[in-house]
Structure formats: structure tokens, C-alpha cells
Image (cartoon, grey):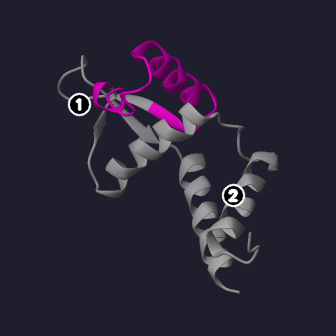
Amino acid sequence: MKKDLPYLRFLNLAKALEDMPKFPALDAVETGLLNACSISWYEGRKLATMEALEAMPEISQRTKHSRLKQLTEKGMVKVESDDYDARIKYVVPTPLAQKYYETLGKYLAKSQAV
């Protein structure tokens, strides 16, 4: 296989994130949930916890709930209550998650700049 493919360069650079001490190691489900949430955040929408748990329908609710909790413990997301209805909770990116995506964006640009 040709080794100078930009996407493969990007995957190689993105894998390096796993070795960086400033970012926590994420498993595939955590990465999928974080990416699903990030689409809503990018669109400027608040993401209710229940809506986040609807992502990745092939994964059980229990597993997704567990991984969302782990993302919180790892400092990638936080859960905030609605200002008017405390029963509604929102999944919100942390500065660490924002830095994670900024780094991925830099890696994507770098992978194309050859």
C-alpha cells in the first residue's frame, strides 16, 4: 500500500494522541460518543444526556452510560443541569476536549501539507 496517503498520515498522527500524557486514553466507544457529541457542539446545540445516549445505536445503553461517566471522570466532558429544569442534564465539552479537537485539527492539516 502506498505510504504517502494523507489519511494514513493523519491516522498515524492521531494515534500519537494516545501516547500524550496531557490527553487520557480513550477506547473506541468513548471516542465514538465524544465524536457524536462534538457534532452537536459544533452546530452550537446543547446536547441533552439522553440525546447523547441515543448515539451509536449498536452499543447498549448501559455501555454508553458507563463510557459517558468515564469521559466525565477523564475530564473530557462535564454534565450540567438545565437552568430551569433540574431534571434535564446536558453534556458539555471541557477545555481538555476542546484542546483534543484542536490538536486533531492540527494533525489533519499537517497530514495534508506534504
Q: Is residue 57 above or below residue 41?
A: above
Q: Residue 51: image x %, image y %?
A: 28, 31
- Near-viewer residue (40 or 99): 40
Asked if the residue under mark 2 is in contact with the one under mark 1, i.e. CB atoms within 8 Å, the reply is: no
Find disc 2 in the rendering and name its residue: 14
Assess disc 1: are there few (<14), some (14-19) or many (≥20) residues with their C-alpha within 10 Å of its C-alpha: few
Q: Residue 44: image x %, image y %?
A: 28, 55
Q: How many marks?
A: 2
- Near-viewer residue (35 or 2): 2
Q: Is residue 59 left or right of residue 13?
A: left
Residue 56 magenta: yes
Distance Cα–Cα, label 1 vs label 2 = 37 Å
Q: Is residue 105 left or right of residue 35?
A: right
Quadrant containing the N terminus in the rendered view: bottom right
Q: Which mark is residue 58?
A: none
Q: Is residue 12 left or right of residue 45?
A: right
- Near-viewer residue (4 or 80): 4
Q: Please name which of the two marks, 1 or 2, marks the residue nearer to the observer.
A: 2
Mark 2 lies on a secondary structure that is helix
Q: Is residue 7 above or below residue 17?
A: below
Q: Residue 78: image x %, image y %?
A: 48, 33
Q: Is residue 112 left or right of residue 87?
A: right
Residue visible at 45% across and 19% down in the picture: 65
Quadrant containing the C terminus in the rendered view: bottom right
Magenta-tinted stretch: 50-78
Mark positioned earlier in the residue sequence (1 or 2): 2
Q: Which mark is residue 83?
A: 1
Q: Residue 59: image x %, image y %?
A: 44, 24
Q: Is residue 95 above or below residue 69?
A: below
Assess disc 2: are there few (<14), some (14-19) or many (≥20) residues with their C-alpha within 10 Å of its C-alpha: some
Residue visible at 68% across and 66% down in the picture: 8
- Near-viewer residue (22 or 4): 4
